[in-house]
Image: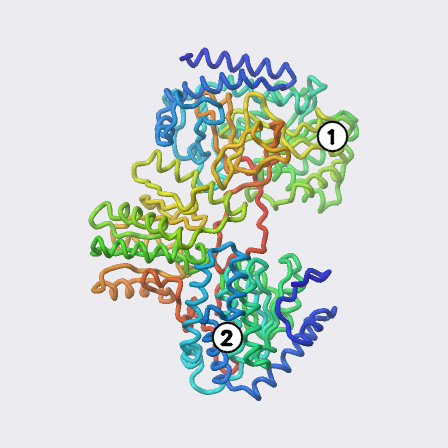
Amino acid sequence: MPTRTQLQKRIQGFIAARSQAGLRADGSAFEALALELFAYQYGANEPYRRFCTALGRDPQRVRHWSDIPAMPTVGFRELPLCCFPVDQATGWFATSGTTGPESGRHYYRDLTLYDRSWAGTFKPMLLPELERMRVVALVPPWRNVPHSSLAFMVERAIDRYGTRDSTWAWDEGRNGPAVERVAELLREIEGRREPVLLLGTAFAWVLFLDWAGQRDLAWRLPAGSRLMETGGYKGRSREVPREEFRRLLVESLGLPPVAIVGEYGMTELGSQFYEPSLSLGQPTDFKAPNPWAAVAVMDPYSGNVMTPASAPVQGCRGLVRVFDLANLDSVMAVQTEDVATLLPSGSFRLEGRAAGAAARGCSLDVDAYAAASGAGSEA
Amino acid sequence: MHEDERGLQILYAPGELADACARPDWAAGLFAEGAARAGAARRRRSWRQAASTLKGVAAAWLDPHDPLRMAAEAGIAQQTGQAQAMVRHRLDLLLERLAAGELVRLWEEELGTVERTGCRTLFAVLAGTLSEPALLTICQAVLLRSFLVARLSRGEWAAAARWAEAIAGSDAELGGLLCLLTWPPAAETWTRQACERAEGVLVYGHDETVARIRQWTPAGTRFVGRGHRVSLAVVGAGLGERELTAAARALARDVALHEQRGCLSPHYVLVEETPPGRALGFGLRLAAALQQLAREWPAPLLAEQDMLRWRAALNRWRMRAALAREVSLWEGGAASGPRFCVVASDPGPTLPDNPGNRFVFVLPVRDWPAIEALLCPLRGRLGTVGIACPDARAEAWIARARSWDPQVRVAAVGRMQDPPLTWRDGGIGNLEPWVMDVGWRAEAGKG
C-alpha cells in the first residue's frame, strides 16, 4: 500500500495534470487513485474503518470508486475523522452546522493539497483568460476567521490571482458585508473601467443588494468583471430564489448573466465545483465536473448510488455524494444532504437540501412549498 | 374537480354557492348567502336533529359498501398512496364514534343540553394532510348549523367532499351549509377575503401559517389556531415479555396509522430503563411489529422531497449506529428499500429531529424526572402521550403526565390515534369557541 507521502505526491500530480488539461477527466487514473486512497484511509482512519466494517465493506471488496463507503457530513461534526493523531493537525476548518446547532471540524495535517485543489479549479473557472485581476471579497479576512475554509480560499486567491488593489469589504462589527464600502468600491471601479472579480456568499450579496435597493443604487461594472457567489443563506439574510437572485445581481451591478458564477463547496470537502459559465461563454445552471472530485447521487428510494455512467440522459436526482481526492487526511467519500440532478456528463444541478423541518401532522401544510435552499455548508 | 383561471377549485358547493364562488366579489356574496342559510337552518333544525342526521350518515358509512364511503376510501388511497386497508381502519375509527352518538356528548359537555347560537359563518383552513380534522370540522359546523367555507388541502380532500355529499343526501338543508374549496397557498387574497367575511376562523397549519392568518382576521372575529404538536409514548417498568410484545404491536399501529403525519402520531418512545437494556429490547420488538404491519398496511411511496429528507436522516443514524455502541437501528418494510426505521439511542439533551413516515426513536429513560427533562422543550406543544405500563401503575402515569401539562391527552398505546370527539385539543373546545352566548376568551387558541 502506498504511504501518505506517496499518495499526496500522486494526487498533487494528478490535480496538476488535470488542471493543465483543461479539467478534462481521466477516469481510469481517478479510479486507481480513489481505490488506493480508500485503502489508505481504511487503514489509517479508525472511526471510518469501523463505519466501513459495519457496512460490510473493505478495500478487498470495493472494486469501483462509487462503492467506497461514504461518510455522512454529520460524521465530521461528531467524530475526529482524520488519518493521523488530531494533535498533529496543522489546522482545521469548522463546519457551519447547516443541519443543526453543532459545529464540527475538518482537520488537516497540512494544507498543501487543499491549496492545489482550490487553485486547480478557481483559475480555469473564474480567470480563464487572465493571470491577475482586482478582487473585492465580501467575506471576512482569514486572520479574523482562521477556521473558515472559504475565507482561507479567498485569502489565497487574492494572494495568487489578485492585483495589489484587491481588498476585503467586510464589517467585523456587523459581521456582514461593509455595504457602504462595497458601494464606494464599485463606484470607483465603475469610473476606472477596470474589471473586477467579486467574491462573496449568497447571503452577503443579498444583504448588500437589499441595502443598495433601498437607496436606489445601481452600477454598471466594466466589461470583463465577474462575480462568484457561494453557499446558502443560513438564516443570515432573506432567502431569494436563484433566478431572482441572479436577476438582482445583473440589474444592480450591470453584469451580464454569463459573468455570474455559482460555486459549490463545503468544509467537509477539499475541492470545489463551479458553474462553467465563463469558460463556456454562456450562462449555466449546473456545476461542471471536477476531475479529482467525482460526484454521484444516492437515489433516496433505493439507496443505490448513481454515477454519471449510470445516469439517464435527463439525469437522476438524489443526495449528492462526493469522492474527493483532496480529502487525503480525512475521508474521501462524503455523503451530503444536498440534492442535485446528476447528468451523464458528470455535471450536476443543485436543487436545495434534503434536511429541514420534519413533516408535521394534521398541521402539515402540504401545499406550502418550503423552498429548500442553502446547499453547501462552507463556512 | 375544476380549477378556474384564478386557481379556485370547487370541491363541493351545492346550487347557487358555486355560482357565488365564480363572482369577483365571491366572499361577500358567499358569506351573505351562507349567513341566510344558517339562519334558516337554525329555524328549522335543532342541534339534536343535526346530531341525529350526522349519526345516521356515519352509521350508513360504516357499511363498507356504501357508495360514497367507498368513493371516500378510494379517494384517500389515491390521493395519499396509503394502503386501502389502513384508510378503511382510519375511517372506521372516526365513524364508530360518530355513529355511537358522541356528537351529542360533545354538545352536552361543551354547551349543555339547551340550544345555543353559534357563529352564522365559519371559515376553516384545513391545510393538513389528514381528512379526519376536515370531517370533524364539517360535523361541528353542521351541529352548530353554521355555514362553513373550508379551504381544504390540495393533497387530501376526497373524503371531506364525499362526506359533505352524504350529509346533503340525508338532509339537503344541512348539506347546503357546506362549501368546500381549495386554492393554491400563494393565492393569499382568497384566504384574506374569507377571513374578513367569516364570523369565526379556524386554522390547522404550520405555526407560521396560523400566525399569518390570525393577522388577517379582524379583531372581532373569533379565531382558533391549531398548530404543530408532537406526540410520544412512554413504556413504564414492570411489563412482562408478553405485555412488551403486545405494547410494541399496538404502538406500531399508532406509528403507521396516518404515516406519522398526524399530531397524535408517536415519534418517540421513552422506555423506563429498569432493568437496563429494556429500550433496546423494545426497539427490536417495535421493529418486528412494524415489519409485520408492513404486510397489512404497506407504507406508501413518499413524495421525492419527503423521501430525500427521510433518506438523509437514515444515513445519519446508520452512521451513528455503526460507530456508537449506544445506538441501534432497525430498518425494513419493503424489498425495494427501507420504509420504516427504528432507532434506539441514549437520549441527548433534546429529542432528535424526526422525519416522520414510520421513523421512531426509542429512548431509554431512568425515571419520571428524566422524562420531564426531555419533555421540557415540548411544553405546550405535546399532543398525546401514549402509555404502556402495568394496570396498577397506569393511574400514577396519567397523573404525572397531567400534572406536568394539564392539556396533554393521555391514552393507552394502540389508542393514541383514536381520540374521543369530546377531546379538547390544547384545552380548547370544539364547539364552544363558535358559540356567541358562551363566554370564551378570544385570545385562547394556540399557534
* Residue type marked 2: Gln
Q: Residue at x 28, y 57 (%)?
A: B246
* Res. A235 image quadrant: top right
Vertical position of residue B271 compared to residue A208: above or below: below
Please state which of residues B136 and B199 is positioned toward the viewer in this rendering: B136
Give the percent coordinates (x, y) of residue B211.
Answer: 55, 61
* Protein chain holding label 1: A
Give the percent coordinates (x, y) of residue B29.
Answer: 70, 75
* Residue type marked 1: Gln
Crowd tier of the residue under label 1, counting other residues whose Cα lies within 10 Å: few below 14, some 14–19, many 20 or above: few
Give the percent coordinates (x, y) of residue A99.
Answer: 48, 41
What separation in Å lies between label 1 and label 2 (alpha carbons)?
Answer: 59 Å
Crowd tier of the residue under label 2, counting other residues whose Cα lies within 10 Å: few below 14, some 14–19, many 20 or above: many
> Does residue A61 appear in the picture of this structure?
yes
For label 1, the SS is: loop
> Does residue B207 appear in the picture of this structure?
no
Vertical position of residue B45 compared to residue A217: above or below: below
For label 2, the SS is: helix
* Res. B27 image quadrant: bottom right
Residue that mark 2 sits on = B140
